[in-house]
Amino acid sequence: MAEVLESPWEPRTAPLRLVILGSTGSIGCNTVDLISHHRDAFEVVALVANRNVQRLAEQARALRARRAVVADASCYGALCEALAGSGIEAAAGPEAVVEAAVMSADMVVAAVVGAAGLAPTLAAVRAGRTVALANKESLVCAGRLVMAEAKRHGATILPVDSEHNAVFQVFEGPNAGRVEKVILTASGGPFRTWSRDQIEAATPEAALRHPNWAMGARITIDSATLMNKGFELIEAYHLFPVEQDQLDVLVHPQSAIHGLVQYCDGSLLAQLGAADMRTPIAHCLAWPRRIKVPAARLDLAQLGSLTFEKPDTGRFPALSLALSALKRGQGAEAILNAADEVAVAAFLERRIGFADIAQVVEAAIEKAEQAGILAEPSSFEDAMALDGAGRRFADEAVARASIKGEGGAQAFR
């Protein structure tokens, strides 16, 4: 569990030096957009992308970054060509990504998607950086390790995810021991009102039509299954000084309230805002100050009403799987994440159905338990070993899914 940050307001006298890991993704692009509106307040040290060379080069030129890094080493030549004449350093490969994460900077925005983000995030933490964390896999796969290393090296972790950032804004550090409950909200995704039969027949196109948020493909599918909300509960457990039974989820279709904290005196504090990721990103970039964000303002009168309901874990079993992994602890969370990543990719490729995603994940966790490998990862290597095992077990379950019609659910076992 983490300590809640308390910091006095101190005016900055120099631009904030930034490294952005995952600059061409959804969070990265929103971060770049914010910086473009506050050019004098930020200095971009390095930008890192996977293999989107064109967008990375455009960003690097626009922000006058010192270095641009592409994780896919095969894209190095293309990046050098795209940056020709700019004076911007080019680098490529996983080692170059980690090197960028520890460059001299005030803050590292960790927005690489998937388990690939763990290595550079952990490197930034061990370098004692302030990390604006949007890579949820770092905490889901190795939350205890990451938070322990942050404490050991004096790193500060600021939550970028809208729900955790909302809780961060209303969590009173001095009253941490008087918190009764931390509540994360969920839109319910595109299938909130669908029947079980309709959900089972859902297509990738339908699952990718999120009602409120514009996000990457994996997180959008995870939002449709509610697995994303399960991941966020795991993250919240590591980010805030609360016990597992103090965490809860409310389905809130309007996505106006992003997180709530309930105190022992009956007070329920909530953070509200438009469904725009630039707001929580800006909160992290400016913390403990605030900067102006060119986002729509939430008009409560126009919205009219706010509604809430309990999540239906019968129709959305992925949420229960995540809660079970959190309670089980040790390596179950890493297996959960790895298996989900494989299952979501298989669904998007139409190799399994929507309802099969949770079954593949459940089968992978059961296989890992049977193999006796669910030990708490105490190092990056341990976490990656669990990640690899989870992917193998999920791949096996996906392969068996083709005979599901003959063997029923047992086809996943």
Image (cartoon, rainbow, N blue to C red):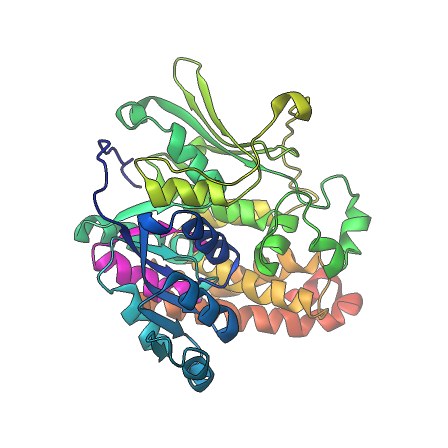
Q: Is residue 134 magenta?
A: yes
**Residue found 74% across the figure and 59% down from its top:** 205
Considering depth in this image, is 2 or 67 the residue closer to the camera? 67
Question: Of 42 and 191, which appears nearest the observer?
Answer: 42
Corner quadrant of residue 362: bottom right
Does 296 appear above or below 232? Answer: above
Residue 403 position, x and y percent, is 75, 72
User: Magenta stretch: residue 314 in it?
Assistant: no
* Residue 373 seen in render: no
Residue 3 image point, x, y percent: 27, 37
Taking the view exactly as shown, the residue that stands out farthest to the front is 85
Q: Quadrant of the N terminus?
A: top left
Instruction: State the extent of the magenta-drawn residues as a range.
Output: 116-136
Name the quarter where the C terminus is drawn. Answer: bottom right
Disc count in the image? 0
Asked if 77 appears above or below 45 in the picture, the reply is: below
Can residue 8 be seen at all in this image of the molecule? yes
Instruction: Identify the residue shown where x is 35% and y is 45%.
Output: 285
